[in-house]
Image: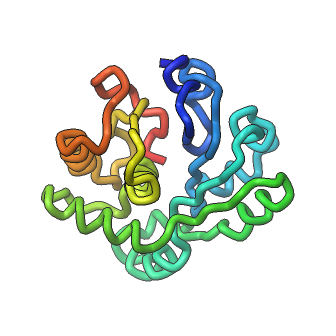
Amino acid sequence: MAGIIDAADFVIRFNDCRSYGAGGSRTDAVAVCNTGRPAKAMLGSPEWRAHPGVVSAGEIWSVRDPETFAAMRAPLAVSHPELDDFCDDYTDAFTAFCADTGKTHVVIDKSVHEAVDASLSAFDPQPYVVPSSGMIVIAEVLERYAEAEVSLAGFGHAGWEWHPFAAERQLVDSCIAAGRLTRLGGKMLVSSSHGA
C-alpha cells in the first residue's frame, strides 16, 4: 500500500508514525493524543521530534479537546482511578512545538467529539472512556473534506480496552456502506495506532 498512500493528496499518520516506511513516507499531518502519557512521551522524546514523518508534516492535529478532557477528570477519578494522569493536558506544549518548527497546530473541536459519541450510541457500545484517536480523526476528515475521497489504512479497531472498538468498527462500516470511506485493499489491516 505504500505507493498508494504516498500518491494521496493528504496523508495523516498517528502519534509516533509507526506506519512510516512500510506504509509509505508521505506525511502531511500527524494526529497526536495531546493528553496523558502518550503526549508526555512524545513531547519528551528527541526521537519523536526527529522522526522523518514528524519533521516533514506541515500540521500537528491534537485529537483531544482540552475542555472535554478537563470535564472528565473528576468523574474518571471515581470510575477509573488508575487513569489519574489521563486528562493531563499538553495542548499548549504541542502549540509551542509547532511554533518552533513552523507547523500548523490544529485542535479538533469539542463538537467533533460530541458527534462521534452520538454516532457511536447507535451501535450500543460497551461502557468506554473515550473514542479512539482514529475515530475522532475520521470524523474530522469527513467533516472538513466532505467532498474528498477518504481511504483508511491500518485501522484494525483493536487496542486499548477503554476505547469502544466494536462500535467504532460498525460506525466505520456504515460510513463505507454509505460511500463516504474506503479501506485500502478492502480489508482491515493491523492497527498502527494501538488504541492511541
Residue 133 on image: x %, y %: 45, 52
Figure check: 118 above or below 191? below
* Residue shown at 40% from the left, 35% from the top: 152
64 relative position to 134: left or right:
right
Q: How is the image coloured?
A: rainbow
* Residue shown at 61% from the left, 62% from the top: 106
The quadrant in which residue 182 appears is top left
Residue 16 on image: x %, y %: 63, 39
* Residue shown at 40% from the left, 73% from the top: 111
The answer to whether residue 9 is seen in the rendering is yes
The quadrant in which residue 102 appears is bottom right
Front in this rendered view, residue 143 or 113 = 143
Front in this rendered view, residue 50 or 185 = 185
The quadrant in which residue 156 appears is top left
133 relative position to 51: left or right:
left
Count of marks overlaid on the render = 0
Residue extending farthest to the front is 147
Residue 39 on image: x %, y %: 63, 56
Figure check: 181 above or below 188? below
83 relative position to 45: left or right:
left
126 relative position to 189: left or right:
left
Front in this rendered view, residue 115 or 90 = 115
Residue 35 on image: x %, y %: 58, 63
* Residue shown at 55% from the left, 41% from the top: 12
Residue extending farthest to the right is 100
The answer to whether residue 132 is seen in the rendering is no
